[in-house]
């Protein structure tokens, strides 16, 4: 699409990167129906409407999410070819269609004869769609489109975005639960679809791919006042990136968060009930986590612009480990505090790492494909988490075994992060 349609941004009296910031932030927030905390609120309603057990629904989530992860590297290639404008708008519009499909999945199951197998296949297809389009394509495209508009304060700008995203993710379960209570789960899905479709139309009109194609300079510099010392950053291909330990450290660390946090979020009501805590406490847990995450994100986003990512990644993994230990003792107040602090600080640092690790180390040219592979692995990990916790509960009668498994993986990654050499190019 022409960057001058429907208007030329060079005629505006301000730097258009700030409009891109708005759409990048909104795009991630509008991906909530495809995120775990968006779907988790509907879990018990899907179980009742489709006639599935909790484990069967978790396995459907696994199948749909794993299936979606297989196509995300290719979606990253489409981003490199088509640009963020088309990909954000297209992903949001298709996400709306998938939400409408899930809203009638139980009716379709009845039309095709009902039964566990039919319901399982239909909801698996729905999970595939929302996970691929929401958590995968829309999130990744919205995150990447901002990074090429800012360079000097990329970390701080990304963290400012993370502030609003964290708040949106924190209140989403409460808002969705309110929508379901007041209108019904099916009507809530219709309303979410309408919002996603509206955002797709606006994004197609106002979003732009990068400053160069629009005839402006990065960071808001003018041609009369160019950047004082422009640096041409070399870009690695996907093959080159995957041959470095830094790529795998960042990818596996981010994916470990996806596995653990997704499992906890998906089963949040059940996990809190096992610890003797109420559903209200379970949904309210997201708010203090978001506050801690937001403060961490802002502070570390400001600090990381002039520092190596390595210490931030180490603290991130140590924080997740602390939160995991707190989860084991959730029935105690200290356990709850450790869970909130650990997952809050870790979540804030996760945002910093996911925003900067790949563009810093591998450049912008193949960013979509490289982050596409990372997102694919993260989505795959997020699929394993809920099923792992469900199976652990079925086999042992509690969530302790899968929690210890996650803690062991975090210890291994923490050792990896300490010993691996991370040399970032000068910015």
Image: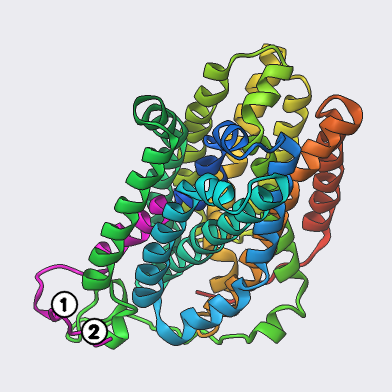
State the residue at coordinates (54%, 73%): 359
- Residue 82 image point, x, y percent: 41, 84
State the residue at coordinates (54%, 44%): 106
- Residue 426 image point, x, y percent: 55, 75
Circle 2 SS class: loop
Callouts 2 and 1 close, C-beta under 8 Å: yes
Q: Which residues are magenta?
A: 1-30
Residues under labels 2 and 1: Cα distance? 8 Å
State the residue at coordinates (69%, 79%): 241
- Residue 121 image point, x, y percent: 66, 55
Q: Residues within 10 Å of mark 1 (few under 14, many from 20)?
A: some
Q: Is residue 4 magenta?
A: yes
Circle 1 SS class: helix
Q: Residues within 10 Å of mark 2 (few under 14, many from 20)?
A: many
- Residue 310 image point, x, y percent: 67, 58
Q: Quadrant of residue 152?
A: bottom left
- Above or below — where is 253 with respect to 19? above
Which one is nearer the viewer's eye here, 42 or 348?
42
Name the quadrant of the N terminus: bottom left
Q: Which mark is residue 3?
A: 2
- Above or below — where is 387 with respect to 398? below
User: Label 1, on which residue?
Assistant: 9
Res. 258 in view: no
């Amino acid at each position: 699409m022409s960057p001058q349609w429907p208007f030329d941004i060079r005629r505006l009296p301000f730097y258009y990167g700030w409009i891109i910031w708005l759409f990048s932030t909104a795009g991630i927030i509008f991906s909530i129906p495809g995120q775990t905390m968006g779907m988790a609120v509907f879990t018990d309603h899907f179980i009742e409407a489709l006639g599935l057990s909790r484990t069967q629904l978790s396995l459907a989530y696994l199948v749909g999410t794993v299936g979606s992860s297989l196509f995300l590297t290719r979606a990253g290639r489409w981003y490199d070819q088509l640009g963020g404008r088309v990909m954000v708008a297209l992903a949001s519009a298709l996400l709306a269609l998938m939400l409408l499909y899930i809203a009638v999945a139980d009716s379709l199951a009845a039309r095709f004869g009902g039964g566990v197998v039919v319901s399982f296949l239909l909801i698996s297809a729905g999970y595939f769609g929302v996970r691929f389009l929401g958590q995968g394509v829309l999130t990744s495209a919205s995150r990447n489109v901002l990074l090429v508009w800012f360079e000097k304060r990329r970390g701080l700008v990304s963290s400012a975005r993370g502030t609003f995203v964290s708040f949106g993710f924190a209140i989403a379960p409460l808002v969705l639960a309110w929508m379901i209570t007041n209108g019904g789960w099916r009507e809530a899905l219709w309303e979410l679809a309408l919002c996603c479709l509206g955002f797709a139309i606006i994004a197609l009109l106002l979003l732009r791919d990068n400053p160069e194609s629009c005839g402006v300079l990065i960071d808001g510099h003018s041609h009369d006042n160019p950047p004082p010392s422009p640096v041409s950053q070399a870009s690695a291909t996907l093959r080159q990136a995957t041959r470095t330990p830094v790529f795998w450290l960042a990818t596996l660390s981010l994916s470990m968060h996806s596995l653990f946090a997704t499992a906890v979020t998906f089963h949040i009501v059940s996990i809190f009930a096992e610890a003797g805590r109420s559903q209200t406490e379970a949904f309210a847990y997201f708010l203090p986590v978001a506050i801690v995450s937001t403060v961490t994100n802002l502070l570390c986003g400001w600090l990381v612009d002039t520092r190596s990512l390595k210490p931030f990644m180490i603290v991130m993994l140590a924080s997740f480990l602390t939160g995991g230990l707190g989860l084991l003792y959730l029935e105690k107040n200290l356990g709850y505090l450790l869970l909130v602090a650990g997952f809050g600080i870790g979540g804030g640092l996760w945002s910093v790492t996911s925003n900067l690790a790949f563009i810093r180390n591998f450049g912008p040219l193949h960013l979509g494909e490289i982050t596409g592979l990372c997102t694919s692995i993260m989505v795959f990990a997020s699929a394993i988490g809920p099923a792992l916790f469900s199976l652990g509960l079925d086999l042992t009668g509690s969530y302790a075994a899968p929690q210890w498994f996650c803690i062991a993986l975090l210890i291994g990654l923490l050792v990896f992060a300490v010993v691996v050499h991370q040399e970032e190019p000068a910015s």
